[in-house]
Structures are given as C-alpha cells and as structure tokens.
Image (tube, rainbow, N blue to C red):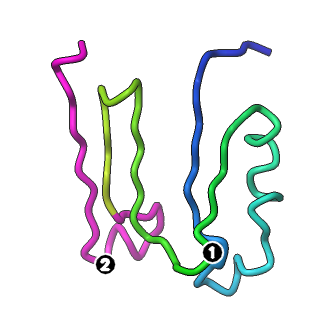
Amino acid sequence: METRNVQVEIITARNRDQPIYSSFLNSDLFRELIARGAKIYEEPYKYLHMKAVDIDDGKFVTIGSLNQDHCSFYQNNEANILIKNYINF
C-alpha cells in the first residue's frame, strides 16, 4: 500500500443529534484513520455542525455547514466557501 505524508486531524462532537448515529462510537467510525496516525478530538458538551477542510497548509480551505444529503442540497439554506491562497503556490 502506498503511503504519503498526509496529516489528518478531525474535531468532532462526542454526542450526535441524529438518533440513527447515536449508537456509533468515534473509536469505531475512525478506527482505520486512527490506525494510520490520524488525530481525533472530541467536543464532549456541544453538537458541531460547521465543517472545515485545510489542504496543503492553507493552499485550499473550505468552511461551511453543507452536508452531503438531500435536505442540504434542496431544502436547507446551507453553504460552503472555498478559499484559494495563491501566495503559497
């Protein structure tokens, strides 16, 4: 298997607001990522909805609330923003 020098850190809520996911533990959901060196941080007291992704130390950053589901695409008023940092290129 090919390995790359990729650093993965995930900040997530310990508790979930959707009953279908309430029985899943982060240790189960992220088992393979943790085994490959990812760092997982849990917020114990609040639900988290906002998402952020930083690629190549700030060359590309996306921030927003959009989920990948039907409601987010067609019913909710959600959005993300993509920021491209040309200075680091």
Label 2–label 1 contact, CB within 8 A: no
Which mark is drawn over residue 29? Answer: none
SS for dot 2: loop
Q: Nearer the viewer, mark 2 or mark 1?
A: 1
Q: For the point 70% across and 76% down, which residue is it?
A: 21
Residue behind mark 1: 44
Q: Amino acid at mark 1?
A: Pro
Q: Is residue 50 above or below residue 31?
A: below
Check disc 2 and report the residue beneath it.
Answer: 76
Please say whether residue 70 is one of the residues in the magenta stretch. Answer: yes
Residue 18, placed above or below residue 34: below
Residue 14 as seen in the image, left or right of residue 25: left
Question: Measuring 32% from the left and 79% from the top, which residue is drawn there?
Answer: 75
Kindly state the secondary structure of the residue where label 1 is placed.
Answer: loop
The picture places residue 25, in percent across and down from the top left corner, at 79, 68
Which residues, given as a range, are shown in magenta?
65-89
Where's residue 83, x and y in %?
21, 39
Q: Nearer the viewer, residue 2 or 69?
A: 2
Residue at figure coordinates x 62%, y 56% from the top left = 41
Q: Is residue 40 above or below residue 25?
A: above
Whether residue 50 appears in magenta in the rendering, the answer is no
Determine the CA span between mark 2 and mark 1: 27 Å
Residue 64, image x, y percentages: 31, 59
